[in-house]
Image (cartoon, grey):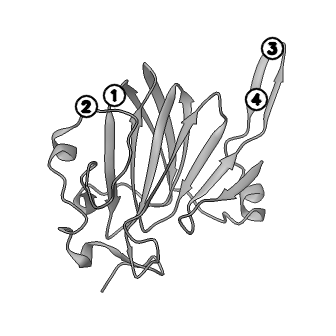
Amino acid sequence: MKIIQTELSGVLAIELDRYTDARGSFVESWHKEKYARLGIGIDFVQDNISYSKKGVLRGLHYQNPSPQGKLLFVLEGEVFDVAVDIRVGSPTFGKWFGMTLSYENNKQLYIPEGFAHGFVVTSDVATFAYKCTGYYRKECEKTIRWDDPDIGIVWPIENPVLSEKDRVGSSLKEMPRESLFTFDRKPLE
């Protein structure tokens, strides 16, 4: 397993080891002690699986209060996964990082608290799994526009399929500052 620091402090790309023989393959997607030795000493409390069709874009979502860090990976298909730094005072505030996750490329993305998250399905279908450091709380969920021009994400699709919530999200500029995070990843007071 190899951990790669991205240009957004705390967002980590992870290349997993795959063991293959004539019967198939095996991948260890989480091992608390091994990840802790590599600097990801996290307690996950909730696992989610999302199944979506090609062109479905979900995000950009975050929760505050009750933030969630996420360890993301694909079980089937391919997605383009994105993290946006929403930590006021961060040198990369409003910047984004994106990468392709697929079963074939054997990669994970760890997005800590203090970031918004979104993804778009680039294969016919995708089964996307993620472990969360906090429980989902609908009343705490916030949505930033997937196409916020100030963020400028270059999505690999032109006309995504969106939920109503994602269609009417706010720009990062419009988000109340108290709904964002400080650079130390704690909610603003």
Instruction: Tell me what residue is drawn at x 51 percent, y 63 percent.
Output: 112
**In-image side of 29 versus 180 (left or right):** right
Q: Is residue 163 above or below residue 98?
A: above
Disc 2 to disc 3: CB gap under 8 Å: no
Task: State the SS at label 3.
Answer: loop
Q: Which residue is mark 1?
A: 55
Comes first in the chain, label 2 or label 1: 1
Check the picture and name the quadrant holding the C terminus: bottom left
The amino acid marked with disc number 3 is Arg
Comes first in the chain, label 3 or label 1: 3
Q: Which residue is mark 3?
A: 23
- The part of the image, by quadrant, that contains residue 179 is bottom left
Measure the alpha-carbon separation of dots 4 and 2: 36 Å
The amino acid marked with disc number 4 is Phe
Q: Which residue is mark 2?
A: 159
Give the tally of numbered discs: 4
Q: Position of residue 181 (x, y in %)?
A: 37, 75
Instruction: Tell me what residue is drawn at x 49 percent, y 60 percent.
Output: 69
